[in-house]
Image: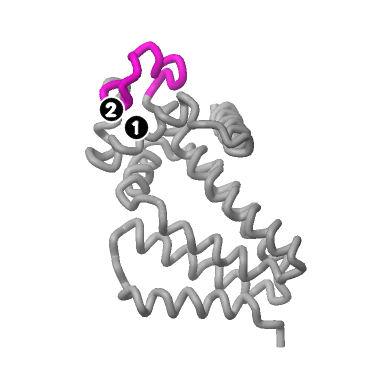
Amino acid sequence: MQCSKLGTVHQDMALHDETEDRGEKPSTREVILDAAERVVARDGSRRLTIDAVVQESGFSKGGVLYNFPSKQALIEGMVARMIAQTRARHDAALSQAEAAGEDPMPAMVRSLLQQKEMDRAVSMGLLAALAEHPDLIIPIRAAIAEMRDEMIARSADPELASIIVLAADGLHFSDILGLDILPDDQREAVEARLVALASEPRS
């Protein structure tokens, strides 16, 4: 069961990446996932149903069920898209830095800090949904571990890289939970310091 779900998530990621690469308009699946995210953001994950997505998306019930035959399939699709978007930012930052002959670590840290742009309500809804379906955390854990390992492998100071990644993750989850632990000016200063730390050579 877990292997099947992991395969589904990776397949969704590949489909998403292909659409983005071709510059096409959003596919039916993407429009349905947009509608599902709006339902979650507005009403919470417990109100995410096929009927709610049908109403929100404007598609027929058959059209929604063809692409996502269950609520769990919708959640899997949302998780896959979240992973794909994060992975795409990471890969783009790495490629651009390497093409410019720059240290890729600061660029990857900036990419990691951009996670806060995801709608807080959607993120909280996905967390709630993952509590109901904990096996869906598997592809998220795998993607995070892969990106973290890439960052650490390219750092002159692996321990410092780990600290930076953990700090960035902490900021991200404080956003999701609405903790607002830092005012905007301090938050910007902290993020700038994390990027600067990523640029420092190992002493």
**Residue 6 seen from this side:** no
Query: Mark 2 or mark 1: which comes first in sequence?
Result: 1
Observer-nearest of 110 and 19: 19
Residue type, mark 1 in image: Ala
Residue 82 percent across, percent down from the top left: 48, 44
Residue located 64% across and 74% down the image: 159
Mark 1 Cα-neighbour bin, 10 Å: few <14, some 14–19, many ≥20? many
Residue located 39% across and 60% down the image: 173
Mark 2 Cα-neighbour bin, 10 Å: few <14, some 14–19, many ≥20? some
Residue reaching furthest top? 62
Residue located 31% across and 58% down the image: 177
Q: Quadrant of the C terminus?
A: bottom right
Instruction: Verify CB contact (< 8 Å) between mark 2 and mark 1.
Output: yes
Residue type, mark 2 in image: Glu
Segment tinted magenta in the rendering: 53-70
Give the vertical position of 173 relative to 50 (above or below): below
Residue 67 percent across, percent down from the top left: 46, 20
- Principal SS element in the magenta part? helix
Q: Which mark is residue 84?
A: none
Observer-nearest of 172 and 162: 172
Q: Which mark is residue 35?
A: 1
Q: Is residue 45 left or right of residue 141?
A: left
Q: Quadrant of residue 128?
A: top left
Give the vertical position of 59 relative to 36 (above or below): above
Observer-nearest of 21 and 81: 21
- According to the picture, the residue beneath numbered tag 2 turns out to be 56
